[in-house]
Image (cartoon, rainbow, N blue to C red):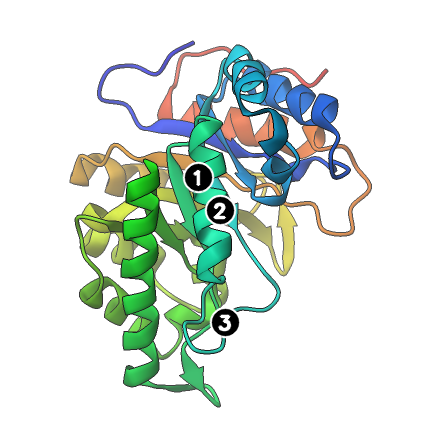
């Protein structure tokens, strides 16, 4: 069911499900599962689209047939450029071109913290911001909008790094994806930060925890009602993305995504029937 007018968009990451590299059938099946749970769109890691770049028209047609918007492709690496703290520029450019041809709307970049021995380094943050501005221009030229995704380090020490990145990047080109789980780990007031910077925020990654264990949305301590109040007060109309990562978890993604979908529906679209696992 399409979202109501003036409603936020509900999305889901594909990484709740295990997908062998190059398994197009599995990827398309995951998109069908996401659609079956009532989500409007999806986000996926860049490795999941790399194998589709040899048949762009056919792959795009199959993705569109799945019936969910391709909200974003996400580049997350274990190691980043030591000068820019981001992915290499040639990788960003290549993925941006391919992702746009596949119908993606945004590029999401994660990065390394711009800190020296855990201490705030303004010069390093400024280099990182400049690299984000360059990457945003490359993405814009390819037809995508760029967003930066935080991890806990950007929110340490009162959030000096994330605030500096927001101040030093072009607001017409660079937006931010706020990860509630990582903000919580850093001890940040996520709702308060969102209220302050909602105009630079294009999406929320919503994750729930019971102690240190990630659990499906609605089963932990994340206060979705507080987020809804903040969203309504700001008149924000971005994306709320269920981030149901299952690290070292052999259970199928549906066991997390079905309850996550229901929690989001109860919060943001009350009255809709709940999704059923199966």
- The residue lying at 55 percent from left, 55 percent from top is 76
Q: Position of residue 23 (x, y in %)?
A: 75, 30
In the picture, the quarter occupied by the N terminus is top left
User: Which of the two discs, 1 and 3, sits closer to the camera?
Assistant: 1
Say what secondary structure mark 3 lies in.
Answer: loop
- The residue lying at 62 percent from left, 17 percent from top is 32
- The residue lying at 54 percent from left, 47 percent from top is 208
**Distance from Cα at disc 2 to Cα at disc 1:** 5 Å
Q: Is residue 127 above or below residue 87?
A: below
Mark 2, residue position: 94
Within the image, what quadrant is residue 126 found in? bottom left
Tell how many labels.
Answer: 3
Say what secondary structure mark 2 lies in.
Answer: helix
**Residue 97 has which mark?**
1
Q: Position of residue 115 (x, y in %)?
A: 42, 82
44, 87: nearer the viewer: 87
Disc 2 + disc 1, Cβ < 8 Å: yes
Residue 7 visible in the current orientation: yes
Decide if residue 166 is on the left or right side of residue 20: left
Within the image, what quadrant is residue 168 found in? bottom left
Q: Is residue 28 above or below residue 180?
A: above
Disc 2 + disc 3, Cβ < 8 Å: no
Which of the two labelled residues, at mark 2 and mark 3, occupies the earlier sequence position? 3
Say what secondary structure mark 1 lies in.
Answer: helix
**Residue 143 has which mark?**
none
Mark 3, residue position: 81
81, 37: nearer the viewer: 81
Q: Position of residue 86 (x, y in %)?
A: 45, 65
Which of the two labelled residues, at mark 1 and mark 3, occupies the earlier sequence position? 3
Badge 3 local density, few (<14 within 10 Å), some, or many (20+)? few
User: Which of the two discs, 2 and 3, sits closer to the camera?
Assistant: 2
**Distance from Cα at disc 1 to Cα at disc 3:** 20 Å
């Amino acid at each position: 069911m399409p979202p109501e007018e003036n409603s936020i968009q509900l999305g889901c990451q594909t990484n709740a499900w295990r997908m062998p590299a190059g398994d197009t059938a599995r990827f398309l099946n995951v998109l069908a599962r996401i659609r079956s749970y009532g989500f409007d769109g999806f986000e996926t890691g860049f490795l999941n689209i790399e194998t589709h770049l040899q048949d762009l028209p056919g792959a795009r047609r199959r993705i569109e047939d799945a019936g969910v918007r391709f909200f974003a492709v996400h580049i997350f690496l274990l190691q980043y450029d030591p000068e820019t703290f981001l992915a290499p520029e040639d990788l960003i450019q290549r993925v941006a071109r391919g992702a746009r041809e596949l119908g993606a709307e945004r590029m999401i970049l994660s990065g390394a913290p711009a800190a020296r021995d855990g201490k705030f380094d303004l010069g390093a943050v400024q280099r990182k911001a400049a690299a984000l501005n360059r990457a945003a221009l490359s993405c814009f030229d390819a037809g995508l909008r760029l967003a930066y995704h935080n991890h806990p380090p950007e929110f340490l020490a009162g959030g000096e790094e994330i605030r500096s990145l927001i101040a030093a990047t072009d607001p017409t080109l660079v937006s931010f994806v706020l990860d509630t789980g990582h903000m919580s780990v850093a001890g940040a007031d996520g709702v308060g930060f969102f209220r302050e910077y909602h105009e630079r925020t294009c999406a929320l990654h919503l994750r729930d925890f019971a102690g240190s264990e990630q659990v499906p949305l609605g089963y932990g301590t994340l206060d979705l009602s507080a987020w809804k109040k903040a969203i309504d007060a700001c008149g924000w109309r971005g994306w709320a993305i269920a981030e149901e990562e299952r690290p070292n978890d052999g259970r199928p993604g549906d066991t997390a995504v079905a309850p996550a979908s229901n929690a989001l529906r109860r919060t943001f679209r009350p009255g809709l029937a709940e999704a059923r696992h199966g």
